[in-house]
């Protein structure tokens, strides 16, 4: 359970980073 949450958090952080780069 905790592992799944950690994986989701990591994916969200990656997505946010990508969006930040796209938005410049």
Image (cartoon, rainbow, N blue to C red):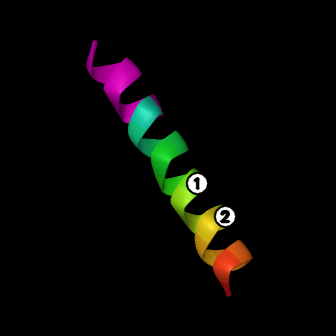
> Which residue lies most toward the top here?
1
Does 17 sit left or right of 10 as displayed? right
The one of 4 and 22 positioned closer to us in this rendering: 22
Residue 13 vertical position relative to residue 24 in the rendered view, above or below: above
Which residue has dot 2 on it? 18
Q: Provide the residue span drawn in magenta.
A: 1-7
Name the residue: 27% across, 21% down.
2
> Which residue lies most toward the left here?
2
User: Is residue 6 one of those drawn in magenta?
Assistant: yes
Name the residue: 62% across, 66% down.
19
> Which residue lies most toward the bottom here?
24
Rendered image: mark on residue 14? 1
* Quadrant in the picture for the N terminus: top left
**Neighbourhood count class around disc 2 (C-alpha, 10 Å): few under 14, some 14–19, many 20 upward:** few
> How far apart, in angstroms, are the residues tagged by discs 1 and 2?
6 Å
* Quadrant in the picture for the C terminus: bottom right
Secondary structure under tag 1 reads helix
Task: Determine whether label 1 and label 2 are within 8 Å by CB.
Answer: yes
In the picture, residue 23 is in which quadrant?
A: bottom right
Does 19 sit left or right of 6 as displayed? right
In the picture, residue 9 is in which quadrant?
A: top left
Secondary structure under tag 2 reads helix
In the picture, residue 22 is in which quadrant?
A: bottom right
User: Is residue 8 one of those drawn in magenta?
Assistant: no
Name the residue: 58% across, 54% down.
14
């Amino acid at each position: 359970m905790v592992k799944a949450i950690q994986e989701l958090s990591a994916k969200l952080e990656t997505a946010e980073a990508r969006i930040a780069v796209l938005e410049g």
